[in-house]
Amino acid sequence: MIKAENVRKVYAGEVSFLALDNISFEIKDGEFVGICGKSGCGKSTLLNLIGGLDGITSGTIEVQGKNVGTMGDRELSDFRNRTVSFVFQAFYLDPNLTVSENVAMPLLIAGVKKKEREKKALALLERLSLKDKARNKPAKLSGGEMQRAAIARALITDPAVILADEPTGNLDVKNGREVLRLLKEINESGTTVIMVSHNPGDLENCTRIIELSDGKIIRDEVCG
């Protein structure tokens, strides 16, 4: 379960910016939640706070019983490696590594032996129809293939939560639909998926929609 209580996020500067304004919600295990709203409403900020990529100004976020805001650097690193995984619009694959090596990277960080890393990476690539690309560098992949590789990397540690930030943003319609199909399949296997999207069509795959406006929740409803 993910539980947020009275969460505020203020970005300080010459002019401070209130990105999230005292929001609270709970997400149960196994939900597929879409977070939507206009540009600048706080969608990606919220995802980053849940995943521990950014600090909370006030309030609390608990993920699987862990208070994200009180974690130290080492605990946060382990949290991001084991409990949550990210899928980004820009893929973030290392151009100097093979696809298989990119997918296996979280296991390398976790100290898993090479043979086991390779075995699990290849199994995931086969599941996502990329096994024939395992030894290629990312530059030789299409956009859809790169995003599928990024999803395989996110899955390799068997996380409880997948955080997807505009995962179809750099893809054409066909590849975007394939990525959404994969995320839905992942969710149906029991993994919680939280997806930020500005595309109403993407949100049709979600079981719940949370809409933000000016840092506040203006809609929270179950779909279907």
Image (cartoon, helix red, strand yellow):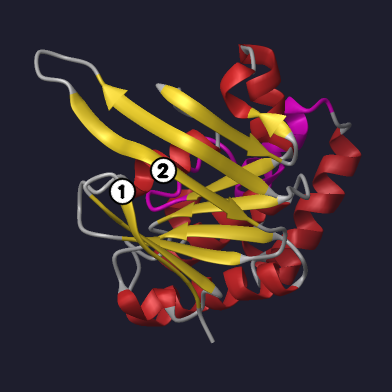
Who comes first in sequence, dot 1 or dot 2?
2
Q: Verify whether residue 144 appears in magenta.
A: no
Element assignment for label 1: strand
Residue 213 in sight here: yes
Magenta segment:
88-111
Question: Mark 1 = which residue?
Answer: 216
Q: Is residue 34 above or below residue 184?
A: above
Residue 135 in sight here: no
Residue sitting at 75 percent across and 30 percent down? 108
Residue, far bottom: 224
Element assignment for label 2: strand
For residue 29, what is the image quadrant? bottom right
Tags 1 and 2 touching, CB below 8 Å? yes
Q: Is residue 73 above or below residue 124?
A: above
Question: Mark 2 = which residue?
Answer: 23
The one nearer the camera, 123 or 63, is 63
Q: Is residue 157 above or below residue 65?
A: below
The one nearer the camera, 135 or 94, is 94
Characterize the local packing of mark 2: few (<14), some (14-19) or many (20 or more) Cα atoms within 10 angstroms. Answer: some
The answer to whether residue 213 is left or right of residue 34 is: left
Residue type pointed to by label 1 = Lys
Disc number for residue 190: none
